[in-house]
Amino acid sequence: MPEITIYTDGSARGNPGPGGYGIVMVSGPHRKELSQGFRLTTNNRMELMGVCVALETLKFPESEVVIYSDSKYVVDSVEKGWVFSWERKLFRGKKNPDLWMRFLRVYRQHKVRFVWVKGHAETVENNRCDKLAVEAAGGANLPEDTGYRPE
């Protein structure tokens, strides 16, 4: 099975405000784009939700996946192992525990590696994700991000 390349980006206007995520998934000759907007959320929630949705979209367990993201929040939390420490402490005092638990459930079903890319730079697919996220956030009748909790 070929490696799956996933690009994700999230965006929120106002932070909190309307937001969305964009995803581009590539495997061999196959390509899939996904996006969704929400009426009140944060940038970090959209960055993380995009990763969750992308991994949940995979059809085969144990898929080899490389995720490209411009979110230091997501990439460093996983690659530096912080999220596993937060999990042991039941996410006490951490933001977005609902999404981190969702992430860990699906993350453990695959072989995932993260690569940080600079946002709004020359990474074509990351720029496409940004465009998808911004367009999704600007949609009409956006659903509620049910996990968002104002501080």
Image (cartoon, rainbow, N blue to C red):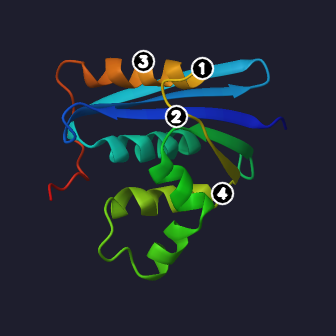
Q: Is residue 14 left or right of residue 43?
A: left
**Residue depicted at x 14% and y 54%:** 150
| Amino acid on which the number 1 mark rests in the picture | Glu
In the picture shown, does residue 113 fall above or below 30?
below
Which badge, 3 or 4, is on the more N-terminal residue? 4
Q: Residues within 10 Å of mark 2 (few under 14, many from 20)?
A: many
Which badge, 4 or 1, is on the more N-terminal residue? 4
Q: Is residue 20 left or right of residue 119?
A: left
Q: Secondary structure at mark 1?
A: loop
What residue is shown with label 1?
Answer: 122
Query: Can you see residue 58?
Result: no
Give the numbered dot on residue 109: 4
Which mark lies nearer to you, 3 or 1? 1
Which mark lies nearer to you, 1 or 2? 1
**Residue depicted at x 38% and y 25%:** 133
Query: Can you see residue 49?
Result: yes
Q: Residues under labels 3 and 2: Cα distance? A: 11 Å
Which mark lies nearer to you, 4 or 2? 2
Q: Residues under labels 1 and 2: Cα distance? A: 15 Å
What residue is shown with label 3?
Answer: 131
Q: Quadrant of residue 42?
A: top left
